[in-house]
Amino acid sequence: DIQMTQSPPTLSASAGDRVTITCRASQSISSWLAWYQQKPGKAPKLLIYKASSLESGVPSRFSGSGSGTEFTLTISSLQPDDFATYYCQHYNIFSTFGQGTKVEI
Amino acid sequence: QVQLVESGGGVVQPGGSLRLFCAASGFTFSNYGIHWVRQAPGKGLEWVAFIRYDGSNKYYADSVKGRFTISRDNSKNTLYLQMNSLRAEDTAVYYCAKEGGPGYCSSTSCRYFDYWGQGTLVTVSS
Protein backbone atom coordinates (compact mmCIF):
# COMPACT_ATOMS: atom_id res chain seq x y z
CA ASP A 1 0.00 0.00 0.00
CA ILE A 2 1.12 3.55 -0.75
CA GLN A 3 1.56 5.76 2.30
CA MET A 4 1.25 9.55 2.17
CA THR A 5 3.18 11.60 4.72
CA GLN A 6 2.42 15.29 5.19
CA SER A 7 4.58 17.83 6.98
CA PRO A 8 4.39 19.74 9.14
CA PRO A 9 1.36 18.51 11.14
CA THR A 10 0.76 22.04 12.37
CA LEU A 11 1.93 25.32 10.93
CA SER A 12 1.70 28.68 12.68
CA ALA A 13 1.56 31.62 10.33
CA SER A 14 0.29 35.15 9.92
CA ALA A 15 -1.82 36.79 7.25
CA GLY A 16 0.38 37.70 4.29
CA ASP A 17 2.87 34.89 4.91
CA ARG A 18 3.99 32.50 2.19
CA VAL A 19 3.17 29.00 3.35
CA THR A 20 4.40 25.66 2.02
CA ILE A 21 3.08 22.21 2.93
CA THR A 22 4.87 19.05 1.83
CA CYS A 23 3.45 15.64 0.98
CA ARG A 24 5.63 12.60 0.35
CA ALA A 25 4.52 9.30 -1.15
CA SER A 26 6.10 5.98 -0.15
CA GLN A 27 6.53 5.16 -3.85
CA SER A 28 6.09 7.02 -7.12
CA ILE A 29 2.53 8.13 -7.82
CA SER A 30 3.29 10.07 -11.00
CA SER A 31 1.15 13.23 -10.72
CA TRP A 32 -1.96 11.61 -9.25
CA LEU A 33 -2.13 13.94 -6.29
CA ALA A 34 -4.83 16.31 -5.07
CA TRP A 35 -4.99 18.89 -2.29
CA TYR A 36 -8.06 19.70 -0.22
CA GLN A 37 -8.93 22.39 2.32
CA GLN A 38 -11.19 21.55 5.24
CA LYS A 39 -12.67 23.91 7.79
CA PRO A 40 -14.19 22.71 11.10
CA GLY A 41 -17.55 21.03 10.65
CA LYS A 42 -17.39 21.29 6.87
CA ALA A 43 -16.67 18.93 4.01
CA PRO A 44 -13.28 19.09 2.30
CA LYS A 45 -12.97 21.38 -0.71
CA LEU A 46 -10.85 20.52 -3.75
CA LEU A 47 -8.03 23.00 -4.41
CA ILE A 48 -5.55 21.25 -6.72
CA TYR A 49 -5.63 18.05 -8.81
CA LYS A 50 -3.04 16.30 -10.94
CA ALA A 51 -0.41 17.82 -8.65
CA SER A 52 -0.55 21.31 -10.14
CA SER A 53 -3.92 21.92 -11.82
CA LEU A 54 -5.93 24.60 -10.05
CA GLU A 55 -9.60 23.71 -9.58
CA SER A 56 -12.01 26.20 -11.11
CA GLY A 57 -12.93 29.01 -8.72
CA VAL A 58 -9.95 28.48 -6.41
CA PRO A 59 -7.87 31.64 -5.85
CA SER A 60 -4.58 31.81 -7.72
CA ARG A 61 -2.62 32.26 -4.47
CA PHE A 62 -2.89 28.47 -4.16
CA SER A 63 -0.45 26.45 -6.25
CA GLY A 64 0.79 22.90 -6.34
CA SER A 65 3.97 21.32 -7.64
CA GLY A 66 5.87 18.06 -7.73
CA SER A 67 5.75 14.61 -9.25
CA GLY A 68 6.86 11.13 -8.35
CA THR A 69 7.15 11.06 -4.58
CA GLU A 70 7.44 14.68 -3.42
CA PHE A 71 4.77 17.34 -3.70
CA THR A 72 4.11 20.78 -2.29
CA LEU A 73 1.13 23.04 -1.77
CA THR A 74 2.01 26.73 -1.60
CA ILE A 75 -0.16 29.61 -0.50
CA SER A 76 1.60 32.71 -1.78
CA SER A 77 0.02 35.21 0.63
CA LEU A 78 -2.04 33.73 3.42
CA GLN A 79 -5.50 35.24 3.83
CA PRO A 80 -7.69 35.07 6.97
CA ASP A 81 -10.03 32.66 5.15
CA ASP A 82 -7.12 30.22 4.58
CA PHE A 83 -6.74 29.15 8.19
CA ALA A 84 -7.88 25.54 7.92
CA THR A 85 -6.60 21.96 7.68
CA TYR A 86 -5.10 20.82 4.39
CA TYR A 87 -4.95 17.24 3.14
CA CYS A 88 -3.08 15.67 0.26
CA GLN A 89 -4.59 12.67 -1.50
CA HIS A 90 -3.06 10.09 -3.78
CA TYR A 91 -5.97 9.18 -5.99
CA ASN A 92 -6.59 6.05 -7.90
CA ILE A 93 -9.33 3.48 -7.50
CA PHE A 94 -8.00 3.14 -3.93
CA SER A 95 -7.30 6.57 -2.48
CA THR A 96 -4.91 7.42 0.35
CA PHE A 97 -4.91 10.67 2.28
CA GLY A 98 -2.12 12.36 4.18
CA GLN A 99 -2.60 12.98 7.90
CA GLY A 100 -3.39 16.66 7.39
CA THR A 101 -1.68 19.98 8.13
CA LYS A 102 -3.45 22.47 10.33
CA VAL A 103 -2.63 26.06 9.42
CA GLU A 104 -3.23 28.26 12.43
CA ILE A 105 -2.46 31.74 13.61
CA GLN B 1 -25.50 23.35 -9.07
CA VAL B 2 -24.02 20.06 -8.00
CA GLN B 3 -25.44 18.78 -4.72
CA LEU B 4 -24.75 15.62 -2.75
CA VAL B 5 -26.89 15.08 0.34
CA GLU B 6 -26.14 12.24 2.73
CA SER B 7 -28.63 10.78 5.18
CA GLY B 8 -29.20 7.65 7.23
CA GLY B 9 -26.64 8.18 9.96
CA GLY B 10 -27.40 7.64 13.61
CA VAL B 11 -26.50 5.69 16.71
CA VAL B 12 -26.20 1.91 16.41
CA GLN B 13 -24.94 -0.81 18.74
CA PRO B 14 -21.78 -2.79 17.96
CA GLY B 15 -22.62 -5.61 15.59
CA GLY B 16 -25.59 -3.71 14.20
CA SER B 17 -26.37 -2.47 10.70
CA LEU B 18 -27.10 0.85 9.07
CA ARG B 19 -27.78 2.00 5.52
CA LEU B 20 -26.52 5.36 4.32
CA PHE B 21 -27.94 7.30 1.39
CA CYS B 22 -26.45 9.94 -0.88
CA ALA B 23 -28.93 11.86 -3.03
CA ALA B 24 -27.35 13.56 -6.03
CA SER B 25 -28.57 16.47 -8.15
CA GLY B 26 -27.23 19.10 -10.52
CA PHE B 27 -25.25 16.72 -12.73
CA THR B 28 -25.77 13.55 -14.75
CA PHE B 29 -25.37 11.05 -11.90
CA SER B 30 -25.11 8.02 -14.18
CA ASN B 31 -21.96 9.44 -15.82
CA TYR B 32 -19.79 9.60 -12.70
CA GLY B 33 -18.14 7.28 -10.26
CA ILE B 34 -18.86 8.05 -6.61
CA HIS B 35 -16.84 7.38 -3.48
CA TRP B 36 -17.55 7.13 0.24
CA VAL B 37 -14.98 8.76 2.55
CA ARG B 38 -15.16 8.85 6.34
CA GLN B 39 -13.64 10.95 9.09
CA ALA B 40 -13.52 9.78 12.70
CA PRO B 41 -14.02 12.53 15.30
CA GLY B 42 -10.93 14.73 15.41
CA LYS B 43 -9.10 12.54 12.88
CA GLY B 44 -8.13 12.63 9.23
CA LEU B 45 -9.86 11.42 6.08
CA GLU B 46 -10.15 7.72 5.20
CA TRP B 47 -11.32 6.44 1.85
CA VAL B 48 -13.99 3.74 2.27
CA ALA B 49 -15.41 2.58 -1.06
CA PHE B 50 -15.86 3.40 -4.75
CA ILE B 51 -18.40 2.43 -7.38
CA ARG B 52 -18.00 3.02 -11.11
CA TYR B 53 -20.49 5.19 -12.96
CA ASP B 54 -22.38 2.18 -14.27
CA GLY B 55 -22.13 0.12 -11.07
CA SER B 56 -20.10 -2.54 -12.83
CA ASN B 57 -17.18 -2.47 -10.40
CA LYS B 58 -16.96 -1.81 -6.69
CA TYR B 59 -13.89 -1.41 -4.50
CA TYR B 60 -13.42 -1.29 -0.74
CA ALA B 61 -10.83 -0.36 1.86
CA ASP B 62 -9.46 -3.38 3.71
CA SER B 63 -10.94 -2.00 6.95
CA VAL B 64 -14.52 -2.44 5.66
CA LYS B 65 -14.23 -5.24 3.08
CA GLY B 66 -16.76 -7.99 3.72
CA ARG B 67 -18.85 -5.78 6.03
CA PHE B 68 -19.83 -2.80 3.86
CA THR B 69 -21.53 -2.82 0.45
CA ILE B 70 -21.66 0.13 -1.93
CA SER B 71 -24.40 0.31 -4.54
CA ARG B 72 -26.25 2.84 -6.67
CA ASP B 73 -29.57 3.35 -8.41
CA ASN B 74 -29.00 5.58 -11.41
CA SER B 75 -32.74 5.87 -12.03
CA LYS B 76 -33.08 7.49 -8.59
CA ASN B 77 -29.79 9.44 -8.62
CA THR B 78 -28.93 7.78 -5.33
CA LEU B 79 -25.87 6.10 -3.86
CA TYR B 80 -26.02 3.69 -0.94
CA LEU B 81 -23.70 2.26 1.67
CA GLN B 82 -24.95 -0.80 3.52
CA MET B 83 -22.93 -1.20 6.71
CA ASN B 84 -23.10 -4.48 8.63
CA SER B 85 -21.23 -5.86 11.65
CA LEU B 86 -20.48 -2.33 12.78
CA ARG B 87 -17.64 -1.69 15.22
CA ALA B 88 -16.76 1.19 17.49
CA GLU B 89 -13.95 2.13 15.10
CA ASP B 90 -16.52 2.73 12.33
CA THR B 91 -17.74 5.80 14.24
CA ALA B 92 -17.23 8.72 11.86
CA VAL B 93 -18.79 11.31 9.62
CA TYR B 94 -19.41 9.63 6.27
CA TYR B 95 -19.16 11.71 3.11
CA CYS B 96 -20.08 10.82 -0.44
CA ALA B 97 -17.85 12.42 -3.06
CA LYS B 98 -18.16 12.71 -6.83
CA GLU B 99 -15.16 12.01 -9.01
CA GLY B 100 -13.86 14.75 -11.27
CA GLY B 101 -13.33 14.85 -15.00
CA PRO B 102 -15.79 14.86 -17.90
CA GLY B 103 -17.65 11.68 -17.03
CA TYR B 104 -17.61 8.04 -18.15
CA CYS B 105 -14.17 7.85 -16.63
CA SER B 106 -12.23 4.62 -16.70
CA SER B 107 -8.80 5.96 -15.79
CA THR B 108 -6.89 7.30 -12.83
CA SER B 109 -7.01 10.84 -14.21
CA CYS B 110 -10.49 11.56 -12.80
CA ARG B 111 -10.36 9.77 -9.43
CA TYR B 112 -10.01 12.99 -7.43
CA PHE B 113 -13.12 14.34 -5.70
CA ASP B 114 -14.51 17.61 -7.02
CA TYR B 115 -17.73 17.71 -4.97
CA TRP B 116 -18.51 16.39 -1.51
CA GLY B 117 -21.71 16.12 0.49
CA GLN B 118 -22.06 17.66 3.95
CA GLY B 119 -21.66 14.30 5.66
CA THR B 120 -23.75 12.12 7.97
CA LEU B 121 -22.60 11.01 11.42
CA VAL B 122 -22.53 7.33 12.34
CA THR B 123 -21.96 6.50 16.00
CA VAL B 124 -21.37 2.89 17.02
CA SER B 125 -21.82 2.58 20.75
CA SER B 126 -23.59 0.45 23.32
Image (cartoon, rainbow, N blue to C red):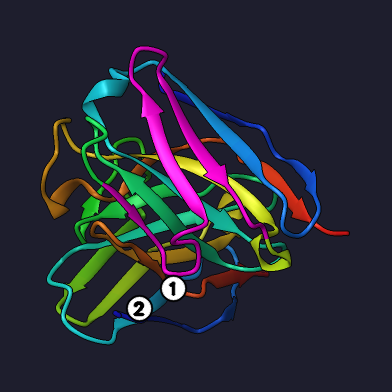
In terms of depth relative to the viewer, which is nearer, B55 or A78?
Answer: B55
- The residue indicated by pointer 2 is A23
Q: Circle 1 is placed at which residue position?
A: A98
Q: Is residue B83 left or right of residue A92?
A: right
Q: Quadrant of residue B48?
A: bottom left
Quadrant that contains the C terminus of chain A: bottom right
What amino acid does circle 2 point to? Answer: Cys
Chain letter of mark 1 equals A
Rendering coords of residue B58 (x, y %): 30, 47
The local secondary structure at tag 1 comes to loop
> Residue most toward the top?
B75
Question: Relative to the observer, which residue lies in front, B103 or B88?
Answer: B88
Residue B104: where, in percent of width, then height? 14, 31
The magenta region covers B58-86
**If you read the primary sequence from the N terminus, does the residue marked by circle 2 or circle 1 appear first?**
2
Residue B6's quadrant in the figure? top right
Q: Which mark is residue B75?
A: none
Which residue occupies 61% across, 37% down?
A: B19
Amino acid on which the number 1 mark rests in the picture: Gly
How many tags in the picture? 2
Chain to which mark 2 belongs: A
Tell me the residue at 12%/71% (across/down).
Answer: A30
Front of the two marks 2 and 1: 1
